[in-house]
Amino acid sequence: MSKTIQQSIDAQDKGFLVKNSIFLPFHIDLISVWIGKDMSLLSKPDVLTDFSDQKGDIHLREGESYTNLIFVHHKELKKEYGHYKGHIILYGTEKGADIFDPARRHYIKLSFHDDTNNVYMELIDDPFDL
């Protein structure tokens, strides 16, 4: 059985990374994904919203207890964004929750801090405060 987003964050669970593929220990209905180097006045993230099967920026797979995000236009996420060089922010709801209710939406920051394939996760209030 899948954990909720909040249960995974509270338990300090980690996802894992394989090249351009991230596995997360929960199910999520994505609205958008922000990916990029740390934000500044000179740098802003790409906002991805195309999750279609054929030509989407991100392909989604779900197992019984996980969500797998495959970033089609990237080869090695850890090389591009690891060691605090950048991060990925997911914007979405728990799987099956009402996406039209703003109280149900979450920003989840994903980062890769070290030489392992761990994906660290944290809930954030506003991605513009990073």
Image (cartoon, grey):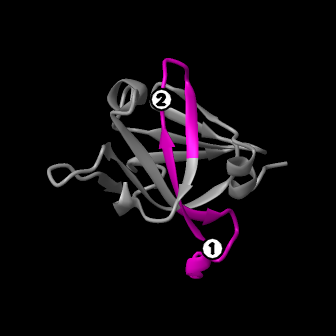
Secondary structure under the numbered disc 1 in the rendered image: helix
- Looking at this view, is 124 or 103 the one in front? 124
Q: Looking at this view, is 90 or 57 the one in front?
A: 90
For the C terminus, which image quadrant?
bottom left
Tell me, yes or no, whether the highlighted magenta stretch contains residue 111. yes
Q: Residues within 10 Å of mark 2 (few under 14, many from 20)?
A: some
Closer mark to the observer between disc 2 and disc 1:
2
In this view, the residue in front, 83 or 3, is 83
The residue depicted at 70 percent of the width and 57 percent of the height is: 6
Task: Provide the residue span drawn in magenta.
Answer: 92-121
Q: Amino acid at mark 1?
A: Arg
Q: Is residue 5 visible?
A: yes
Percent position of residue 24, x then y:
63, 42
Q: Which mark is drawn over residue 104?
A: 1
Q: Is residue 7 left or right of residue 76?
A: right
Q: Earlier in the sequence, mark 2 or mark 1?
A: 1
Residue lying farthest bottom? 101
Image position, residue 87 (x, y; %): 40, 42
Q: Is residue 99 magenta?
A: yes
Residue at 43% from the left image edge and 46% from the top image edge: 88
Label 2: element kind: loop
Kindly identify the residue that appears in the image at 55 percent across and 19 percent down: 116
Tell me the number on the disc at residue 129.
none
